Image: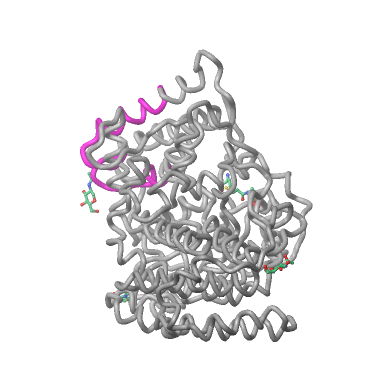
Amino acid sequence: MRFPPYCYLLLFRFLSSSTAFSEPPFSLRHLPATVSAETTAPSAPSASAPLHRRGRSRTASTSTTSVFETNPLKSLFGNVASSISNIQQMGMNQQSSELQALIAQVLASHNIGSWDDIRSALRAKQTPEETNFRDNLSKGYGKASPLHKLRLFDESNDENDVRVIFYRDSASWCPYCHKVWMALEEKRIPYRVEKINMRCYGDKPASFLRMQPSGNIPVAIIDGVTYNQSNDIMYALEKQFPDHKPLIPNDPKQRMKAQELLRLERTLFSAWMSWLTSRDSPNGRLRDNFVSVLNMVEAELSSTKGGFFLGENVSLVDFMFMPFLERMCASMLYFKGFLMRVAPGERTNYPALNRWFDAMDTLESYQLTKSDYYTHCWDLPPQLGGCVPEAGSQPFQNAINGIESGSWHLPLSPNNNGLEPDWAWAGDEDAAKREAVERMSANHEAIVAFASRGAGRSGFPRYGAPLADPNAVSNESVQPYVDAALKILAQKMLETDKNSVDEAMKELASVLKRAGGDELVEDVALSLAYLRDRVGVPRDMRLPAARQLRAHLNWARYHLMM
Ligand SMILES: N[C@@H](CCC(=O)N[C@@H](CS)C(=O)NCC(=O)O)C(=O)O
Ligand SMILES: *[C@@H]1O[C@H](CO)[C@@H](O)[C@H](O)[C@H]1NC(C)=O
Ligand SMILES: *[C@@H]1O[C@H](CO)[C@@H](O)[C@H](O)[C@H]1NC(C)=O
Ligand SMILES: *[C@@H]1O[C@H](CO)[C@@H](O)[C@H](O)[C@H]1NC(C)=O
Ligand SMILES: *[C@@H]1O[C@H](CO)[C@@H](O)[C@H](O)[C@H]1NC(C)=O
């Protein structure tokens, strides 16, 4: 069975939308959405955004909270309590500035300062590599990051050496961009990045459409020549950069083998697509077909010496398989309950495949581009026009969506309870928290405005990706409170004295509740959930940092709503 290229299915579906761009929080570009795990766990990502305020039931109340009454630190800010009753009689502006003064007092009483203070505290804990991150980013140096716009690798290159402009998708969702990105990094070819939206979450600049009328990504301009297909780009890089690490073997026998494996890759792709996008027949024909092709891949990998498809050296074949195998691991588990990659030490029918994943995990070129299951399970359906969940997959969906305890709740369970291996190479828990605080504090204004869409309005027109809503309207009135909650959260991620930070969050809740009732507290909590569901990997941060941030956002919501 032949399938149209991945992503291709929806090509014409969103052609007519045209809207203004929205500001992205973490990266300097768009923040398209991923998902919600909030309301009911949707059995499959649907086009409706689970989390926006319209239709939500609200219970307005200004009653005193018991938390406030029983707060052990009450005396510390007793004057806060007494001033609140007056606030309710004030005009809107005065009310919010009074409230903000009270919140400032809460923060000050727990030694929580400005975002600049948070960055100083972060700096004191960073490793030298972390401290240089932003500086190297602007120069194009250091370990690769999705935030690089210019990539020079190190001082041996300067801007005049750049011969490649690489157009890839803003959200790092597109598998065809993924393989080109890894090849550029593995070969250490200097390049410049232009981020282009996919149709399912935004619009494309006219200048890009003039160059590539189909709108498809990736595109690369190499020495002034435009290449508009991922494979053409990969082969052009091999040809035009002979002094860089070769990804195509010289040996004719190995070349033949590579051709054969690339055909197998397409066969696997088709088997995956067929099953993922349909309900299997009662006799499990689609599953059987997928498993039999996967077994062929397993056999190939178990017959090579060394971790990669062609043996000890990584090649183009590995980079062609990787984007799809990564997406298979995520989607087959989520939609079909079919586990391909296991946690270290677990039994599997695919030991060679698991060794290959481990080998790929050692490559910086892969580490940089690696996504997580959650991001993929919500980025695939809009690209494919839907994926079909099968009976029995619900528990896996819950675990991936962060609903299961320990998946996005503190303390985090290792390897998400065995379903998704941790990224040991990304450092320990504290490193993960520092990464999350670094990304938040570097772009806090945009992040706060973005999160506060959770208490605002959804936009028009809508886009295909669930919760990608570039025209959504942020609720400005909750922004100062969301900002305060995120500062407390950042402090918690850096802090050793956790009790004080927990108290700070409870006191914030009390003050908000006194002044604005349950509705205000709920709006702040909704904003935090909105952000939680839209942390994308690798676009915003790596998986360990994303899990920490998602779990700390849940911690904050818990203390607010308690
Ligand atoms: N055969 C093309 C396929 C590229 C492709 O299908 N790209 C998709 C994204 S994965 C695309 O740009 N779709 C338009 C869009 O989503 O905006 C290649 O290998 O480069
Ligand atoms: C910054 O880049 C230089 C040059 O590549 C490198 O020596 C240094 O380790 C990098 N620092 C970080 C934080 O990556
Ligand atoms: C790529 O460019 C060629 C030549 O300009 C054009 O014919 C083709 O339609 C383009 N392909 C895509 C996918 O845009
Ligand atoms: C792997 O790459 C190294 C370094 O480029 C090379 O010396 C070696 O011969 C390669 N191995 C194989 C099996 O091609
Ligand atoms: C913004 O949030 C405030 C505070 O909760 C709420 O009263 C108001 O209705 C919200 N505005 C919009 C446009 O949703």
Q: Residue 329, how many percent across, how many down?
A: 42, 39
Residue 215 position (above or below residue 224): above
**Residue 121 x %, y %:** 35, 81
Residue 53, horizontal then vertical, whole percent: 69, 57
Relative to 411, is 513 on the left or the right? Answer: right
What residue is shown at x 67% (from left), y 64% (from top)?
61
User: Is there any visible trace of residue 241 in the rendered image?
Assistant: no
Q: Nearer the viewer, residue 353 or 224?
A: 353
Q: Percent x, y for residue 3?
A: 59, 31
Which residue is drawn at the image coordinates 35% and 63% (left, top)? 432
Residue 123 within the magenta-colored segment of the rendering? no
For residue 480, what is the image quadrant?
bottom right
Picture residue at 59% right of the left edge, 40% below the top: 42
The answer to whether any part of residue 437 appears in the image is yes
Where does the N terminus fall, quadrant-wise?
top right
Is 312 magenta? The answer is yes
Extreme residue in the top direction: 283
Image quadrant, ligand 2: bottom left
Which region of the structure is painted magenta? Answer: 292-320
Number of marks in the rendered image: 0
